[in-house]
Image (cartoon, rainbow, N blue to C red):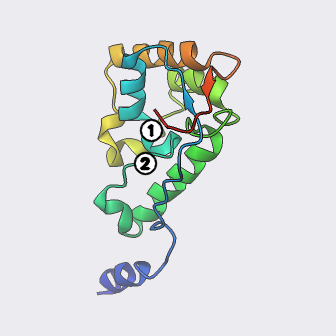
Amino acid sequence: MFLAAAFVLAQLVPYGRAHANPPAQAGPQWDSPQTQALFDRACADCHSNQTRWPWYSSVAPVSWLVQKHVDEGRSKFNVNVPGFGREADEAAGQVRSGEIPEKTDLPLHPEARLTATEHDQLVRGLAATFGAEGGAERGDGDGD
């Protein structure tokens, strides 16, 4: 009974339901269509302004975790803002080392699970796209 009441009360907390997808102001020149496809599948929900919000992202307390991950991901590295964020040049290294995706992301975002081959392709593609300089940027705002 207490757990049910706590669950119902948790739904009254407004955090985690904003689900904003601001307009894209920039977009990278991907090194290949494969890199873009892997990024879109495994990374874009937290590192772009094109987040796909699953149904459970509106149900507390899971919504709080999803919103926190999107907010943090976008603040560090977002392919849809000019300059891509302070960690753009570190993206390949963080994927290579296993820092991202966070382990708590995988149960909620199974598409982010990559095979070893896909993982290696994504690391190489991120390095080629963003390199140490943050990569080539298109500021035309069309978000492609």
Image position of 123 with respect to 64: above or below: above
Q: Where is residue 10 in the image (x, y as percent from the top left)?
A: 42, 78
Of labels 1 and 2, earlier in sequence is: 1
| Residue at the (35%, 18%) spot, across then down | 118
- At a point 42% along the width and 20% down the height, the residue shown is 35
Q: Which of 59 and 78 is in front in this view?
A: 78
Nearer to the camera, 7 or 42: 42
- Amino acid type of the residue that numbered disc 2 sits on in the rendered structure: Thr
Disc 2 element: loop
Relative to residue 6, is residue 117 depicted above or below? above
Contact? badges 1 and 2 (CB < 8 Å): yes
User: Residue 77 lies in what quarter of the image?
Assistant: top right
Q: In this view, does 21 lie to the left or right of 113?
A: right
| 13 to 100, vertically: above or below | below
User: Which amino acid type corresponds to the residue marked 1 in the rendered image?
Assistant: Ala
Which mark, by number, is residue 83? none
How many dots with numbers?
2
Q: What element carries label 1?
A: helix
Q: Where is residue 131 in the image (x, y as percent from the top left)?
A: 63, 15
* Residue of label 2: 51
Residue for point 35% across, 83% down: 8
Camera-side residue: 142 or 123?
142
Please rate how many residues cluster around mark 1, counting C-alpha atoms within 10 Å: few if below 14, some from 14 to 19, many from 20: many
Measured from the top left, where is residue 111 in percent x and y?
Answer: 31, 36
Location of mark 1 (residue): 44
